[in-house]
């Protein structure tokens, strides 16, 4: 397999000779692994690399992860107590992500800190699995622990038919599944171009929608749980014309208004903003509206969207004019031919999709035209999340839970939600509570002491729950 051998060659060049003989035996049955061992191509992926312990009595002082070709837009997660650096370089191919060509990005991630031999830890990064990766095969993520003396390199790649567990130091492997709809979409056209469409792939029988020089393909909306205040719309818009056009608005009968939004990472913080000037569709190019990037938001839902139905949407473009078409509704719980957009499931990296849903949920519940709500940072562990919020001169933290219907606000509080001990008392599993508390410290430090003080100023705890009140008065420092 070409990809496998190229990754192995890179790993061998970077790390050989790496395995210190005295360190090898204790690792035979405790390998570095990926928490989620499979994911579809043409999707976002949250890679959680699990390091089982230190090095045979020695502490691990540095963890290095090599990002394979075909994983793009990679962003590592900072860790409390660890320094983080990245090494960037040119990709072998040119990729298109969110309508923009990218030729370089993060190639290596390095965390420097200390992991004692009798402890374990997780190292996390988000990435896009492009459609140039071969569905049905395994891609390997070379990982190296540098210890007090020597290092252990998890870089061995199994030969065809070989059991990876028979290797002494196998690289963490990710099984690549077919893209949604069963198609790998290998858009590598033999000249270094890897086209990353990233929209829904479940409605291939649907004819493209045409208006002027524009063509809209693969449109869909996400189904909504009971009482959901918002939903999202996704599609790919192609422009065959010689001039750029712009998506400037739209309307539906099931929501109060239609907005065009962008999700992006800024300084390792997920941020969302409305594109008040619209979204440019470049001449001769295309833009993917997808979870975790550009997308359409249906604000203040008048009725809920059910899986399998189709609703009508009207979009307005600056040059092409207006166009009306059917918008299929996909099941938010995922599965073959569906799309899990409660956390944007298989179709995008879990962390990015969940953060998008949480921000939309809080804004839909509490934001008003006169009082915008800022939601950041959002930290997630398992089915729990803590989100900082600020509105006017008030602030606090929301504790959220996720069930089969998606995210909901469990409680609102203040300083107590920074404490792993308090989170565990509420019911958050101990490991998740520890993980969230550590991430909160790092993420909130980026916002400064004034914002932390605002979050801490919320007095007491207000229980909301899945069936609780959506009254914004619950977000008052007087409660």
Image: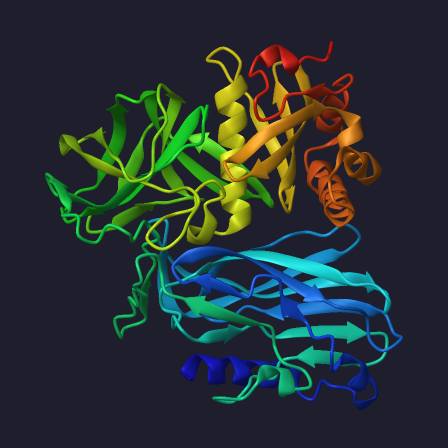
Task: Locate residue 21 relative to residue 227 in the image: left or right.
Answer: right
Above or below residue 342? Residue 371 is above
Above or below residue 26? Residue 284 is above
Task: Locate residue 214 relative to residue 375 in the image: left or right.
Answer: left
Task: Locate residue 189 relative to residue 357 in the image: left or right.
Answer: left
Task: Locate residue 265 relative to residue 40 in the image: left or right.
Answer: right
Q: Specify whether residue 206 is in view.
A: yes
Looking at the image, which is closer to me, 386 or 449? 386
> Percent from the top left, x then y, of residue 392?
61, 14
The residue positioned 76% from the left and 40% from the top of the image is 441
Above or below residue 457? Residue 341 is below
> Percent from the top left, x then y, of residue 72?
46, 61
> Percent from the top left, x then y, of residue 381?
66, 46
Above or below residue 158? Residue 467 is above
> Percent from the top left, x then y, of residue 324?
16, 31
Position of the N terminus, as image quadrant, is: bottom left
Colouring style: rainbow
Q: Specify whether residue 282 is in view.
A: no
């Amino acid at each position: 397999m070409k990809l496998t051998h190229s990754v192995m060659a890179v790993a061998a060049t970077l790390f050989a000779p790496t395995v210190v003989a005295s360190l090898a035996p204790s690792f035979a049955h405790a390998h570095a692994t990926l928490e989620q061992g499979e994911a579809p191509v043409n999707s976002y992926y949250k890679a959680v690399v699990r390091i089982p312990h230190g090095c045979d009595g020695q502490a691990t002082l540095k963890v290095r992860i090599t990002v394979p070709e075909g994983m793009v837009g990679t962003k590592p997660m900072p860790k409390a107590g660890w320094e983080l650096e990245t090494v960037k370089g040119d990709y072998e191919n040119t990729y298109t992500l969110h309508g923009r060509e990218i030729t370089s990005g993060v190639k290596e991630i390095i965390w420097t800190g200390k992991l004692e031999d009798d402890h374990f830890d997780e190292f996390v990064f988000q990435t896009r699995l492009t459609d140039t990766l071969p569905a049905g095969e395994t891609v390997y993520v070379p990982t190296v622990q540098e210890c007090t003396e020597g290092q252990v390199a998890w870089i061995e790649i199994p030969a065809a038919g070989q059991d990876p567990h028979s290797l002494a130091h196998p690289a963490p492997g990710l099984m690549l599944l077919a893209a949604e709809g069963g198609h790998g979409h290998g858009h590598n056209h033999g000249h270094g171009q890897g086209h990353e469409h990233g929209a829904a792939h479940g409605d291939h029988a649907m004819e493209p929608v045409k208006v002027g020089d524009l063509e809209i393909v693969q449109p869909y909306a996400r189904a909504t749980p009971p009482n959901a205040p918002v939903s999202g719309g996704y599609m790919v818009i192609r422009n065959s014309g010689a001039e750029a056009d712009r998506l400037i608005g739209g309307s539906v009968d099931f929501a109060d208004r239609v907005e065009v939004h962008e999700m992006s990472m800024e300084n390792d913080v997920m941020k969302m903003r409305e594109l008040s000037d619209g979204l440019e569709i470049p001449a001769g190019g295309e833009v993917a509206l997808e979870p975790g990037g550009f997308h359409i938001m249906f604000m203040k839902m008048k009725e809920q969207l059910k899986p399998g139905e189709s609703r009508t949407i009207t979009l307005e473009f600056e040059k092409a004019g207006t166009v009306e078409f059917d918008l299929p509704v996909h099941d938010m719980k995922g599965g073959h031919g569906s799309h899990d957009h409660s956390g944007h499931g298989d179709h995008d990296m879990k962390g990015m999709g969940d953060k998008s849903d949480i921000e939309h949920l809080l804004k839909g519940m509490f934001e008003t035209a006169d009082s915008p709500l800022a939601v950041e940072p959002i930290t997630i562990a398992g089915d729990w999340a803590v989100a900082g919020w600020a509105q006017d001169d008030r602030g606090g933290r929301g504790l959220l839970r996720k069930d089969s219907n998606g995210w909901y606000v469990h409680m609102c509080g203040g300083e107590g939600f920074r404490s792993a001990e308090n989170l565990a008392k509420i019911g958050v599993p101990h490991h998740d509570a520890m993980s969230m508390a550590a991430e909160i410290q790092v993420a909130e430090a980026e916002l400064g002491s004034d914002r932390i003080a605002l979050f801490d100023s919320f007095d007491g705890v207000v229980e909301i729950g899945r069936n609780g009140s959506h009254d914004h008065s619950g977000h008052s420092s007087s409660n």
